[in-house]
Amino acid sequence: MKVNLILKNEYVRTPSHVMAEMTDLLKHKKPMDVYNTLTNKYDELSGPTSRRQVHDKKLNDDKKNRQNNAGKVINRGNIADHISEIDALVANGNSIVKSIIRDQCKAPCLILYTEDQLTDLKTLCCSGQSILGIDKTFNLCDFHVTATCYKQVRVAKERSGEPPIFLGPIFVHDNSDFESYSNFFNHLRTKLRDTDKTKLVLGSDEELAIVNAITLAFPESTHLLCKRHLYQNTKQKLIDDSVDKADRQKILGMIFHEDGLIDANDSICFDAKSEEIEKVSKDLSSKFHRYFQNKLKKNLQERVHQPIVSGVIDKPWTNNNSESLNHVLKQAIDWKSKPLLDLITILATLIETQFKDLRKSLVGVGEYKLSETHAHFSVSRTMWVSKTNEERDRLYKRFRLFTPKDTKTVTSTDGKMTVIQPRSLGKKIGQIKRKKTDRTVTVKKQKLH
């Protein structure tokens, strides 16, 4: 008689057809659901012996699948096993992991991207068509994940009509210091070395390590700070300084609300509104007064106000796109932290799917439709089928490399001068009618008798 050494009871072999059914169910169900289903379906001696058996079955099946895909045994006992396997994939060029960074006394860092993502950085972000958002997210694996994202302005979603948010280069790291982030951004700069980066616009929150690393790697580019994060950080600073609610709302309104500091029309208005805020804050909290003078004012002026006045952006920027992408990433891992190798596989699948949907938009199928600026690349399904693979690839390449005319600037007839077009076009604020048909009314002064 065989004995189960762990449970110290008689060993009962589960029928082979039940184990086969267990394998099929585990492909799309959780172990707990599989155990409940099979336990209710079979009798006491035929069903699974325990929940542990179902969990072990899933682990063994996953291990066999990895071995079959890789052609060898893959050990996943600890993070060193994961890094060792990733290192082999990088050496063979069969991974979205492009670089493994190992510094003394630090856990390894990974830089992930595909050539498609790099092309979009050059054609969309470096041309000023889309802002590259940067945000750190947690609980995806045993490391932090700082993901970049951008709007895929070549297409729009079928339902909302808005450009979809595409995943950009990704940084997987443990340390979140300046040196670690510098490795990531300097790597990207190297890859963009032949591309003009003066129109590149990057956006992030106020995390000092990210801000300093971006400033060092892309000094000629524009760096924006998220208005929502600035608002929340300012509000928390006022709460920490024990400023009462009414005064908090007053200061927050003077800075962030309509006609506040961030809506100043020019530098003169900005300085005047800043002086007014300094007077009010000085009487309420000396700590917040110093915080505003030494940090907040400079951030608002350089990374919110100046980009608006110079025409780089139309309104204060928020990293809502990054937050939306973080939600997509959490859904992709089913809201459970994954082993590093599994996360990399999931990210690779997500990226590949996004670009396949982009390619399908050329023939009018899938999640996206071509935007107005790229509508001339549309082809019928009949024409697509008649093309060779090389012709399809050439069409897709032209589609991705096409840069529409910049509507914010205008170039002189001889091509020697390019300037930003005036936004107001000489109209009054709130004017709807054409300039020819809209009369300008001047209030007559009353004569004094």
Image (tube, grey):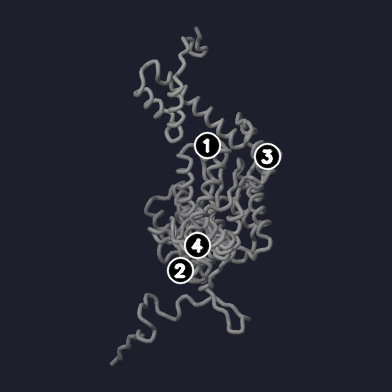
Give me the C-alpha separation between circle 2 and circle 1. Answer: 40 Å
Q: Which residue type carries mark 2? A: Glu
| Secondary structure beneath label 1 | loop
Give me the C-alpha separation between circle 3 and circle 2. Answer: 44 Å
Numbered tag placed on residue 88 in the rendering: 3
**Nearer to us: label 1 or label 3:** 3
Quadrant, the C terminus:
bottom left
Mark 1 nearby-residue class (10 Å; few <14, some 14–19, many ≥20): some
Give me the C-alpha separation between circle 4 and circle 1. Answer: 39 Å
**N-term-proximal mark, 2 vs 1:** 1
Q: Which residue type carries mark 1? A: Lys
**N-term-proximal mark, 4 vs 1:** 1
269 lies above or below 389: below
Q: Which residue type carries mark 3? A: Ala
| Secondary structure beneath label 3 | helix
Circle 4 sits on which residue? 384
Circle 2 sits on which residue? 372
| Secondary structure beneath label 2 | helix
Q: Which residue type carries mark 4? A: Trp
**N-term-proximal mark, 3 vs 4:** 3
Closer-to-camera residue (278/303): 303
Would residue 177 be seen by someone viewing this image from the given angle? Answer: no
- Percent x, y of residue 400: 56, 63
- Percent x, y of residue 221: 61, 63
Mark 4 nearby-residue class (10 Å; few <14, some 14–19, many ≥20): some
